[in-house]
Amino acid sequence: MASELCKTISVARLEKHKNLFLNYRNLHHFPLELLKDEGLQYLERLYMKRNSLTTLPENLAQKLPNLVELYLHSNNIVVVPEAIGSLVKLQCLDLSDNALEIVCPEIGRLRALRHLRLANNQLQFLPPEVGDLKELQTLDISTNRLLTLPERLHLCLSLQYLTVDRNRLRCVPRHLCHLPSLNELSMAGNRLAFLPLDLGRSRELQYVYVDNNIHLKGLPSYLYNKVIGCSGCGAPIQVSEVKLLSFSSGQLTVFLPAEVKAIGTENDHVLPLQELAMRSLHHTYHSFLKGGHQLVLWLTAAPPGACRRLTY
């Protein structure tokens, strides 16, 4: 195996390869062959997924100065070393599924970085220097132990996709609403109890996922016209009957259709509430029309607070 590895690296050096695949090699250490002499000066993409690496060499940037993409998914790396900050041309860094506990502040020196994936690690915080990544477009920090988001994250002006699913977040910083390029925000499986009222105000933000935040009972009005995932939100409640209609001859209590469930029953198919309401109105209207009654309906529809009076 070692001789085959050395041969693969030697061929890449001699033929000035731009891509090198060292996945599934059962590597416990960074190959010395990659680092000897001048290294691989022409290498742009290095794939080392599914190995057993625990650290990165300090002279990585010196030996691989033109590295643009580095894939280290599924290793056993505990610390992102300071040396990572010297890879000034790096645009994509994947450290998902490792054992990361610390990301060094020097990561903020990766000014060309566009995609950073740190999912499935043991991170409890990220350094504020993440906010220095002005070109960052994708940040995936899902399935960690984060209690808060980086305080300068709102300075990542190019950020389009932010995934923080399955952490321990209790709130979302309001300054996150000021990200001008954010298109998709996923915060499922946290401990959120509320969201900033400005969230969704940006026209760029189109997709918001807050599924399985059981303490979250409401959404900001700006999210009403967005694509929203919110199954498993809110404490389950028992709904027996609701007054939907008001008539000139008195009041009528109409039972909520059986299809309506308490929030949180994600396995059941639930029709849109507006459609259910209109079904009930249609049935009641025809029943009373036969009796010659005048029917006055008050309908509450979006936006909140807008009411409409209909007379039949």
Image (spheres, grey):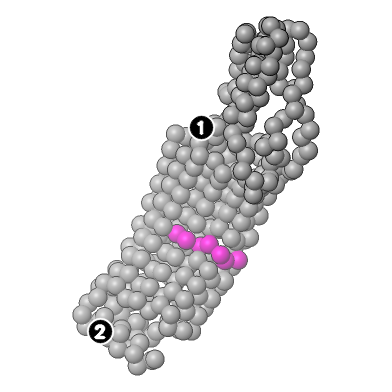
Considering only vertical position in the picture, is 54 above or below 100? below
Farthest residue to the front: give it: 290
Residue type at mark 1? Asn
Query: What range is drawn magenta here?
Result: 116-122
Give the mark nearest the N terminus, 2 or 1.
2
Q: Residue at x 47, y 34 (%)?
A: 202
How crowded pointer 2 is (Cα within 10 Å; few <14, some 14-19, many 20+) is rated as few
Secondary structure beneath disc 2?
helix
Residue 93 is at least partly visible in this image: yes
Tell me residue 192's x, y (percent): 66, 46
Q: Which residue is mark 2?
A: 11
On the rendered image, what quadrant is the C terminus found in?
A: top right
Tell me residue 222's x, y (percent): 54, 31
Tell me residue 302's x, y (percent): 58, 24
Front disc: 2 or 1: 1
User: Dividing the picture into quarters, in which one does residue 221 lie?
Assistant: top right
Residue 132 lies within the magenta run: no
Q: Residue at x 60, y 61 (%)?
A: 144
| Mark 2 to mark 1 CA distance (whole Å) | 55 Å
Q: Which residue is mark 1?
A: 225
How crowded pointer 1 is (Cα within 10 Å; few <14, some 14-19, many 20+) is rated as few
Secondary structure beneath disc 1?
loop
On the rendered image, what quadrant is the N terminus found in?
A: bottom left
Seen from the viewer's position, the closer of residues 149 and 25 is 25
Farthest residue to the bottom: give it: 3
Tell me residue 70's x, y (percent): 39, 68
Residue type at mark 2? Val
